[in-house]
Image (spheres, helix red, strand yellow):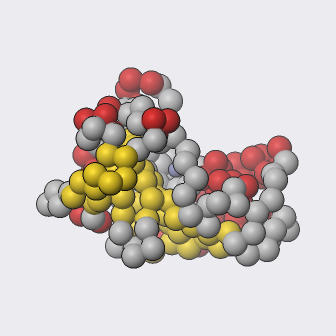
Amino acid sequence: MFKTKKNKSKKCKSKKCKSKKCRQHGGEEVKIDIEYILDSINKDPFEICGYINEKGEHYMVAQGAPKSETNHSASCPSSNYRKMWHTHSFVSKYYPSWQDISKVIKHASVEESIIYTKFGYWTLSCINNTNLEKSFEKKITDILNSFYFNTGNGREYNIEQIRILIINVKEYVSTLIEGFDITWTNY
Ligand SMILES: [Zn+2]
């Protein structure tokens, strides 16, 4: 199940190495597979995150602090990779946060962001980038709140609500920038 392969040539930079797991790995990035990610979603009360290289291989670079320790959402530090991934584990809601959506739009360096959840995964992408006004947070939060209330506080699988979220987010973001996309894929 745990097919990990240490990549000793690529050491974490110090700012990416604050998490316990990263320190446990001696600050090394670890190559992992989808089974490892799914296993973490089902058992870890925190996010794990990393990047995807040109060959489509997943590397883990950090993990967030457990919710119980921080009282905040269990999130990884943000990083600027071309293709990023992170998990929303079983303790989290399975839809993207407004920050998840804003990240691919704001940062020129980030082209694609994949969010692995219990039920499937989101792919967010944006080939262009732009600054976002405060109204972005409000508008996206309204869309996400509607999803939250229609899916048992964001925890019940509901393909119809997923479709509605995608349509509403794309429709709104298309008024701000071209080249944005959000898709959902079941496992
Ligand atoms: Zn997220």
- The spot of residue 160 in percent (x, y) is 54, 72
Nearer the observer, 115 or 54: 54
- The spot of residue 136 in percent (x, y) is 79, 51
Residue at point 81%, 53% (across, down): 131
Is residue 164 something one can see in this rendering?
A: no
Nearer the observer, 172 or 108: 108
Q: Quadrant of residue 169?
A: bottom right
Image: 92 above or below 112: above
Q: Quadrant of residue 125?
A: bottom right
Q: Is residue 44 left or right of residue 96?
A: left
Residue at point 77%, 46% (across, down): 138
Is residue 110 something one can see in this rendering?
A: yes
- The spot of residue 157 in percent (x, y) is 43, 62
Quadrant location of the C terminus in the rendered image:
bottom left
Q: Residue furthest left?
A: 1
Q: Is residue 124 left or right of residue 29?
A: right
Q: Is residue 149 left or right of residue 27?
A: right
Image: 49 above or below 163: above
Image: 26 above or below 116: above
Nearer the observer, 134 or 86: 86
Residue at point 28%, 55% (across, down): 7
Residue at point 55%, 45% (across, down): 78
